[in-house]
Amino acid sequence: MSQQGQATGGAGAPQRTSFDRASVDRVKEFVGFGPEDERRLEEQAHLFERVSDDLADEYYENVRSRRKLDEAFAASELSGAEFKRAHRQYLEAFGDGDYGPAFFERRAEFAPADLFVEPGLNEYVGSYMVYYERLLEEIADEVTAEYTPDAAAEEDAADGAANAETDTAAAVEAAVDETVERTLSTLRLAVLDQQFVIGSKVDDFMEQLASMTQRRKSVREDLEDTVEELEDYAERIGDGTETIDDVATEQSSSTAEIASEMSNLSATVEEIASNTEEVSATAERAEEIAGETTDTAERAIDKMEGVREAADEVTEDVEDLREGVQRIDEIVDVINDIADQTNLLALNASIEAATAGEAGDGFAVVADEVKNLAEESQEEAATIERMVNQIQEDTQETVESLEDANEEIDDGVDLVEDTVENLGEIETAVSEAASGVDEVATATDDQAASTEEIAGMADEVMANADQVAAEVESLAEVSEDVEQQVQVVTEMVDRLADVQQTEDV
């Protein structure tokens, strides 16, 4: 039957309280709860089980009929079914037979019990009268049933009429004694149960009271520290007002000097801004010139590229010319060979004409003419060969000159390209410088405007310095008020300390 642990916990359950064997035994001894009570309760386990359902319903209806208990129940998270089940288990646990520390520890954290301790101990204890009335009735009925004689006993009583009155008196006395003993055992367990529940709540209350006392003591100590700090602040405020007064006077004088210096600074900044604008214009012009120079250099590169292409074409033409002269030289060689052969033929013809006599005179004349023509051809061929050689030499020199010119052109192109690259870097640098100068000019203009604003602010500060001096005087008056308030708080702390000492006693 040890199921009461299932009814524990839930919302509103108190913190678990430990129970040692010595404490439980001491309370049992105080109440008079002993082994005979445990035996009687265990023997009545069937009774507790039998009435648990009906009594749980009756107790639930009793709770809902009491305003404070009903409000506590409505504010809880328990349903009616859960509440009834918990109390059935509570009743059945009366007959467990083991009533050690674990039993009462579970009883102390029984959720419905804790729920109804909160509205007040009177409500909690009063609500259990339903248990007492019903259990006492059930115990009385059971004892009555046990001690009521049956039919056989009545016949025996008729036979022994002389002893009937004596037996009845003894039976009634025994029934009354048994009823009292069973009732006392049940009441002792209920008292133990309630005592531990109430004791746990008293312990919680004492802990809360001690905590509240400690918190109040801590608040008092913190308040004392705060008062000391306020006193220190009040003293420091008094010293500070004098210092601020001196500083305000000195600030007024310094502000006038600052205003004068800021006026001079404003004029200087405006002059710098003017010079910066001139430098910016010069930088922009330099940037334009660098750009124009870059364009000119690029056009020069294009022209030199054209010259190099023309030189390449001339070189190719000269090469073609040299090849043509070479072919002419070869033709001259052929003409020389032909002239040599013609001369040889003329010589042979002359010999044949001399051999022929008068018949060969005409042939001899022709042979002489042919010989003369061959000799003239050789002379002309020699002249052509000399001219060809001269042309070849001139052509070779032209080719070499063109090659040198091409190399110079290549070097010139490279140089101009380097120049263009440098001009590009110069243009970039000048552009960056111009941008920087523009930024400086803008910043200088802003600085000039800011300087004028600062000069105006300096005038305002100088005007505010007088107001600060006036506020310092007001602050001094406030400081005196703070000191008075600190005195009042100090008196309150002293009274609180007296109350604390009285409570401690």
Image (spheres, rainbow, N blue to C red):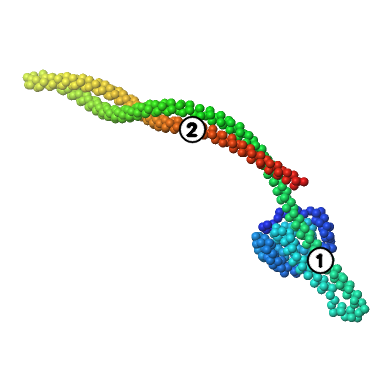
**Circle 2: residue type:** Ala
Q: Earlier in the sequence, mark 1 or mark 2?
A: 1
Q: Is residue 27 visible?
A: yes
* 323 over 475 or under it: above or below: above
Q: Nearer the viewer, residue 116 or 501?
A: 501
Q: Which mark is residue 146?
A: none
**Circle 1: residue type:** Thr
Residue at image coords 80%, 72%: 141
Query: Residue 440, percent across and down?
Result: 41, 30
Other-residue count near label 1 (Cα within 10 Å), few / some / many at <14 / 14–19 / ≥20: many
Residue at image coords 80%, 56%: 24
Which quadrant of the figure has residue 266?
top left
Q: Secondary structure at mark 2?
A: helix
Q: Secondary structure at mark 1?
A: helix
Q: Which residue is mark 1?
A: 183
Residue at image coords 56%, 31%: 245
* 108 over 328 or under it: above or below: below
Q: Is residue 350 visible?
A: no
Query: Residue 505, percent across and down?
Result: 77, 46
Q: For the N terminus, which image quadrant?
A: bottom right
Q: Nearer the viewer, residue 155 or 335?
A: 155
Other-residue count near label 2 (Cα within 10 Å), few / some / many at <14 / 14–19 / ≥20: some
Q: CA distance from mark 1 to mark 2?
A: 96 Å
* 37 over 203 or under it: above or below: below
Q: Which residue is mark 2?
A: 463
Query: Residue 362, percent across and down?
Result: 7, 21
Query: Residue 280, percent across and down?
Result: 37, 29
Residue at image coords 79%, 58%: 100
Apparent side of residue 73 relative to residue 411 in the rendered image (left or right)? right
Q: Nearer the viewer, mark 1 or mark 2?
A: 2
